[in-house]
Each structure stands twice: as structure tokens, then as C-alpha cells.
Image (spheres, rainbow, N blue to C red):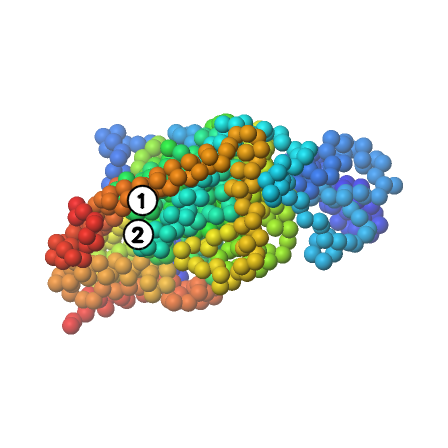
Amino acid sequence: MAALQQTAAADAAAAAAAAAAASPATASLSQCDQQQQPEVAKMNFCNAVNSALHIAMGEDPKTMCFGEDVAFGGVFMCSRGLLERFGRDRVFNTPLSEQGIVGFAIGAAAEGYRPIAEIQFADYIFPAFDQITSEAAKYRYRSGGVYDVGGLTIRAPYGAVGHGGHYHSQSPEAFFTHIPGIQVVMPSGPREAKGLLLAAIRDPNPTVFFEAKMLYRTAVEDVPEGDYEIPLGKARVAQQGSDITLVGWGQQVRVLELAAREVAERDGISCEVVDLRTLLPWDADTVEASVRKTGRLLVSHEAPVTSGFGAEVVSTITDRCFYSLEAPPARVCGYDTPFPLIFEPLYLPTARRIADAIRSTVRHHG
Amino acid sequence: MLAAWRTVAQRRQCPRAPALLAAARHLASQTATASAQSASVAAEVPSSSSGSEPSARLSSSSQQQEERMDFPGGSVPFTAAMSFLGGTFSPRAPLPCYRTIDSAGLAIADADIPHELDQETAVKMYKTMVTLQTVDVIFYEAQRQGRFSFYMTSSGEEATAIGSAAALTNDDVIFSQYREQGVIMYRGFSVQDMAHQCFGNIHEQGKGRQMPIHYGSKSLNFHTISSTLATQLPHAVGAAYALKLQKRNACAVAYFGEGAASEGDFHAALNFAATLKAPVVFICRNNGWAISTPATDQYRGDGIAGRGPGYGMASLRVDGGDARAVYNATAAARKIAVEQQVPVLVEAMSYRSGHHSTSDDSSRYRAAEEMRQWRARDPVARFQRWLVDQGWWSDAQDTSARQEARRDVIKALETAQKAPKPPLSAMFEDVYARMPWHLEKQQAEVFAHVRTHPDACPADIPVK
């Protein structure tokens, strides 16, 4: 199949295009009035994020958007139009310092503001790691609950783009899922992104929000133009199936869907695809229910396999579903190398690698 | 600027001349806006390009030497002379240290005193110093006796903490490091409050979660202390920015030591504060030591105050052992911060007379003679002398104040030690606004473990 001969980057793009052509599912719009269809518009991931930011900024004068290059609209254009609408007090460029951006945001949040801090690439979030883990995550707990930085949201584009190499491709979510006190959210598409981002901004806990940058332009869907939220901490069953549960998040969900279609058509294997949406706290109950039904688990993420978040999912589900499992849980992930440039097609967990792993898991006999 | 490019283009018969000129014209039209927002460079030297007509300059440009470089950061004068500044080349003289009371406690004639200390404030300051000294001595001893696990004194720095605290209002938001207990005490945090926190009992706001001395109080506008150094500096900037947006008559204040000032967060905070114009007063306690590391191993420049101008920030060095100077410095800094909505840096020079903490023995790395010399100019004694000279204090009052403080501190320790600890459930609360499912599960595990093994739970923690 042509799809499987492409790189995973192309996988995701193909999946995105396919999703755009398909009719939108309204099941994810948990807080929308299903009686009256919301006004929707074709939006890409970037438009969806921008839409959420406009709504959040418009509803609360204590909301701010800032970071490197945010004022002119952002290097990915996610903050377009905000400066013109809300002014330079609330929408501004910061000096080039991630530890400064997040530290400053923490201070504003600690005084009751709702800062939406942008880190230009998730690859550059590490200078801010100390502020996130030592300060943001512990602010409420260490103060006995009288202080908190619940208003804080940190947004960062992550993930493979086809040519990003070491420092424009990484998926650092695993580091952050290991921090008690914060939340980690990774939407899988435009409609998910807008609803999850609004939920994250409004949620009274500091949240790190990773946006699949390759989907900024390539993923286009019908997205409600108005206000809606998608709940944090709740996974989405993207498609139902009976033979194996595929778990992913962010742009990898589309790759899982591609692999699922491939094995359905070629091998008659029925896959259930679960989009975790939130990694911390994660919805183990939904995955457990699925694996009890299918008896098989496969987790996939772009991040390196060792100590990736897939390890947490596999460990917890193995503990809960040990006697329901027909085969060892599989992980199809990035390799334990720095993210390579020319080798990206082989580095990434492509639909082909996933399809192969699905087959061998389904055919597994003890 | 335009002239420069035109001359270059003509001289070189550059094929790109039209493009260069167009770019120069564009930049010239931008300069008027850029100059208004330009950084310290342009602020120090007046820009010759702001307000001037590009067309006028164009017509007279061909004979003029270009005098300034206009760039997106501002405007700087050109020079044909090459001379390094700083380091071993024409080193700048260190910023002088402002003081109003000498080492013996005698008032210095003709000192600048823009903010006179009234009797009520001065006496409150001194009494707080007395209480602070008493707390520091007795709590330190309590730790040595094993009554609680850890303590840090602020001996030698009482004037820095209390002198500065006295110059602030209760609306000013404080972010401290860990050796500024005098600040929270001046604000109203009682000795009993301190004892409760050190014992981690049910009465302390932190619910027993952090080590001793990690005070915090929302009602006193004092953010909870964390052990990590300098992380509070960018917080103060963000908080100050919030105050600015609210147009409050208040500033944020960040305390830190000269060692913490080596951290990257110091640089980030000062740069952000100046660039984003946040009303924050940075107060550095340069007490000469970061555990066993003397300041000479910490930096090579002119201390901390010397860095401020580099960020475009007004900076002042002050004698941290002179409570009246610290009071004036802080009041003046606060005034600048609030009125101009800009950051200010104050470096208070003092000395850490005590050990770094109860886990340290500074006699291993410090000369007894050095410590003796600094004890001889103890800030509390200096301020006491000045207070007595004003007729606002007496030896009899001193004796009685110290006795009363001692009684209060001992009683506070006893009360705190007897008080119950927070319940076991406090271990899992406040990690998030609402407890997520996985913490509920883990909490249940801990309770189950304690039910099976009751002796696993510390005897003073209620199992509920």
C-alpha cells in the first residue's frame, strides 16, 4: 500500500488529510448542546489553537499570552490577531529565556492571573524545567493550599516534522508526566486541540500543553467556532474494535488509525484506537476497559522507547489486565537515539512498524 | 544612518545601492519609533535620529561623517578609538556603599536621609531585631537538641531584613530566599507561627510538608519559601507585572543572596523586569558567604549592584548592617519602582555571622578573626546605639525586652512541640486543586499499609 511506504511524517499528513475529508464525529463535543449543531468552520490545528486563545483572552482580562515572538503572531501564527485585539499589556514578546518566561508566568499566576506562556519549541523547554518542577508543580502543596499557580498554562509545539532533526522534533512529554502537581495534555487534532486548550486554560492546575506542530497546517477539520471544552483526564475511543487496543496521543493517533485501517483491510484485524488526550492524570480506566475487551495492548509514541510514557501505560495495564492479556503488551516507539535528520523515516514509529507489531501481537502464542 | 549607506553605495559603486538605500530609508523611518522604546544604550546617550526628517538628512548627508549607529536595540555613537572597558582595562571603581550610621552606631553627619525614621517605626524595628536575635539563638539550640530537624539563623543580617521590611507596605508582595525571617516577623508573623512551622504541626499553613524555616503567609503577602535558590526572582517580576496591570500602589520585592545571584534565574529576572518594566525591588543580601564559598569565589565583577546598570536598572549599594540606611534605600527604591513602574536593584553588604545552617560548621572554613571583626559591628548593636542616642531606647528597656522575648520564644516552642501533627490525609491533598483518581488510590494504599502495620506511621500523625 502506498500509505505504508511513506515516512511516519507523511503517515500523519495522510491521516490528517483523510480526517479532513471524513465527516466529523461529534461524540467528542461533550459540553456542546447536541440538539442544536454548533456553528463549525474548517480550521487547521493552528486556527483551532488561535480560536481558543481568542476566546480565553476575551473572557478574562487577567489572561495574558506571551513568549518569544508572540506579539507579531508567533512563528507558527498561533497567536495571530491577539495583540491587535487585546493590546500590548496582555500580549507581548518576552526576552529569549525559557526559564524567564515560565518563572515570570508563575509569578503572575501566583497573584491570580491567567498567563498562557508559549515555549517556541518543546525542544527548548528544558531551561524552564526547574521552574516547572521545583516551583509550579509544588506551589500549591508547599504553601498548604493558600497559594497556587492554577492559572498557568504552558504551550509548546512538539513532534516530528520531517526535517526537524535533534532540536525541532522532540516529544518530551515523559519528563513532565513524572512531575506530581502539573497536568500534561496532548491533543490529536484541531477539534481536540481547541476544546482541550480551553479546558486547560480554565483548569485550576498548572498545565503543560504540547501541540503537534506538524498538524498546525496539515490537519484540517470542522471545528466549532464558539466556546466548548473537552474534559481533561478523560481518554477518547477514536475508533472501536475487538482484537487489539492501540493507545497513543497527539499526532501519533492518526498514525495508529492508518495502521488500523491497513490491518483491517489486509488482515481482517479489528483495532480499537484510544486517544489518551491527557497524560497526567491519565485515564487508565478507559484503557483498562478496552484491553479487558480486546485482550491485547499496543502503545505507540514518537518519543524514545526507554522510559517513554508508553512504559507507564504498559505497566499499569499489565497490572490491571494481566489475566485478560492474550499477548505481551507491545510498544512501538522512537529509538533511543537523539532525533536523527536523514534517518527520521526509520526512527519514527510508522504505520508500517505498528501494523507489523499488531500482526505479531495478534498472532502471538505463548 | 541614511547618509552612511548612501556614502558606502556611492564609494563602492555597489550594484545593490538602490536596495541598500531603500533599506536604509525604511530603517530611518522605523528609528523614530525604535528610539522611543530603545534600551539603556540610547537612554544613556541621546539619539540624534529621533525626530529628524529623513529627507533633510538625505540632502545634507553626502558631506557628513556618520556619527551614530542606529540598530533595532537603539542608537550608539561611533568612535574610531578602540578602548576596552572593564576587566583589567580601566576597571570601573566599585559602586560606593551608602551608610548613615557608622560601625559604632554613631550617626554620620550630613548623610542623605530622604526618609526619616520616626520613633514608632524605629522602636518597632529594634524590638523585632531583639525578638529575631532571641528566636535565632533559641531555635538553633532547639535543633541541636533534636526538637526539630533544621534551622537557619540570620545573625548579622537583622538590619537588612528588618530595615527593608519597615520601608514596605503590606500591599507589597514579598518573595524571599530563606534567610529573611526578619521580614516576615516585621510584617506580623509571630514567634508562635514560626515555631509551628518548624515543628510542622497542625497549626502551620504548610501542613508539615516542608522543612523548618520555609515560612509563608498569604495574609501577610509573603509567598511560601522554597529551598531552590533564585527561582523566586522571576516570580517577583511576574507578580510585579500583575500589580502594574492592576495599577496598584504596590511593588513586588525579591530577596536573595549573592550566591543565588549567580543562578540563571537572576539574569532572566532582571532582564525581564527591565525590559517588561515591572515594579519590582530586588534586594540582594551580600553576606560574603554561600555556605563555604566566599564571595571572591562567586563573582569577579563589582558585586551584584554593579550588574544592575547592565540591565538598564537603577542600582544602589548600601551598608546592610545600617538599619537606617537600609530603610532609606528600600523606601527610595520602592518609590522609584511604584512611581516609575520600573525595577530597582539594592545590594545590602553585610556578613553571615552564623553558620549557613544547623548542618554547617563554618569554623571549618572561616577565620575566627574575620568573624570577630564582623561581630564587633553587629547591626543590632549599631542600631541600638543610634536609638539610644535619639532618646528612644534605654538599657532597662533592652533588658526587659530581651527577657520577654526569651520567655515568648521558649513558650512558643513548648506550645508548638505539644501541638498535634496534621493528619495523614494531608500527605495527598493540595497536590492538585482536587485529588485525582490516582492519588485517591495511592492514599488508600497508604492507609491500608498503616492499618496492617500501625507502627509504620509516625506516632504523632493522626491516621485520618
- Under circle 2, the secondary element is loop
Q: Earlier in the sequence, mark 1 or mark 2?
A: 2
Residue placed under numbered mark 1 in the picture: B413
> At x 26% / y 35%, what residue is drawn?
A31
* Residue B264 location (% of width, % of height): 52, 52
Q: Chain letter of disc 1?
A: B
Asked if residue A152 is positioned above or below residue A355 in the image, the reply reads above
Residue positioned most to the front: B396
Dot label at residue B147: 2
Amino acid under disc 2? Arg
Residue positioned most to the bottom: A366
Amino acid under disc 1? Leu
| Picture quadrant of residue B107 | top right
* Residue B208 location (% of width, % of height): 29, 47
Asked if marks 1 and 2 touch (Cβ < 8 Å), the reply is yes
Residue B368 appears in the figure: yes
Residue A95 appears in the figure: no
Q: Is residue B13 left or right of residue A347?
A: right
Seen from the viewer's position, the closer of residues A106 and B93 is B93
> At x 57% / y 58%, what residue is drawn?
B369
Please tell me if label 1 and label 2 are on a single chain.
yes
Q: For the residue carrying disc 1, how many other residues have a C-alpha within 10 Å: few (<14), some (14-19), or many (20+)? A: many
